[in-house]
Amino acid sequence: MPELPEVETLCRQLKKRICGKKILNTEIFDSKLAGIKNMRGRSVVAVERRGKTIAIDLDDGNSIIIHLRMTGRLLWQKISTMPEYSRWKMTFADGHIFLVDPRRFATVRILGEKESDAGREIFGNFELTRFIKLHGDRKTKIKTLIMNQNVVNGIGNIYACEILYRAGIHPERTSSSLTAAQWRKIFYQAKNVLKKAIAKRGTSISDWRDLYGRKGENQHTLKVYGKEGKPCSVCGGTICRIKLSGRGTYLCPDCQK
């Protein structure tokens, strides 16, 4: 599933490609998306990321909200030939944006009001002091907590593993066991890891491609995710994989306490 860096990559590319342009037509190719209003004639005034969603703001006050879910991606083409697994298309004078989604989980909505992020946006109005006050006494495991989209926007499995590895925190630690200094370290590393991944256009482990069909490059910088059995780059110990909340979780048991 695309996480914050992948969605941010798409938003930045879309901003350059379609801001200020008029939508000539939108088309639906999948009955699961039936009912989406045709936004023909509307102009794009802004594109921004809201958590893991893409918000395309229009000149009538509405926004097209796209959540890519498991396998969804957006693809820009100058030609109208429909790629395999296309579910929806938005047409401009100089090309087309296709929603390509083999598993058909992605959603497209038209909203008239901007949804509040309620302080969950790590690069927005997130406040660590408030976060600790709200969640610091919980018995929830730290990895599960930072992946909860109702708590922090945009962090998924890959980046949660990388953040906690760099912070030296075991993913099974409970929130209530962490000190203020450890919380600061986690969110310092969160910003650091996510910024670097954005700069490399995301992590292409399987399906992820950017707006122009290119793989990201951050997979080459991963320290722990997918590295089971390999030596830790810090201590030389062995990276292991455990199951946590049903997800494969990678860590160094020697470095992460």
Image (cartoon, rainbow, N blue to C red):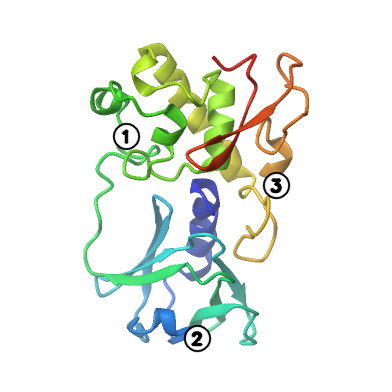
- Which numbered mark, 2 or 1, is in the foreground of this view? 2
Q: Name the image quarter holding residue 199.
A: top right
Amino acid type at image mark 1: Phe
Looking at this view, is 91 or 243 the one in front? 243
Q: Which mark is residue 214?
A: none
Looking at this view, is 165 or 244 the one in front? 244
**Secondary structure under badge 2?**
loop
Q: CA distance from mark 2 to mark 1?
A: 38 Å
Amino acid type at image mark 3: Glu
The C terminus, quarter of image: top right
In primary-sequence order, the first of circles 1 and 3 is 1
| Pointer 1 local density, CA inside 10 Å: few below 14, some 14–19, many at least 20 | some
The N terminus, quarter of image: bottom right
Q: Residue at x 65, y 22 (%)?
A: 252
Q: Which residue is mark 3?
A: 217
Question: How far across and how far down the image is residue 4, in percent?
Answer: 49, 47
Looking at this view, is 193 or 223 the one in front? 223
| Pointer 3 local density, CA inside 10 Å: few below 14, some 14–19, many at least 20 | some
Amino acid type at image mark 2: Phe
Q: Which mark is residue 126?
A: 1
**In the displayed structure, does residue 24 sit left or right of residue 215?**
left
Residue 16 visible within the image: yes
Q: Which residue is mark 2?
A: 29
**In the displayed structure, does residue 51 sit left or right of residue 196?**
left
Q: Residue at x 37, y 76 (%)?
A: 43
Q: Reply above or below: 233 against 91.
A: above
Q: How many marks?
A: 3
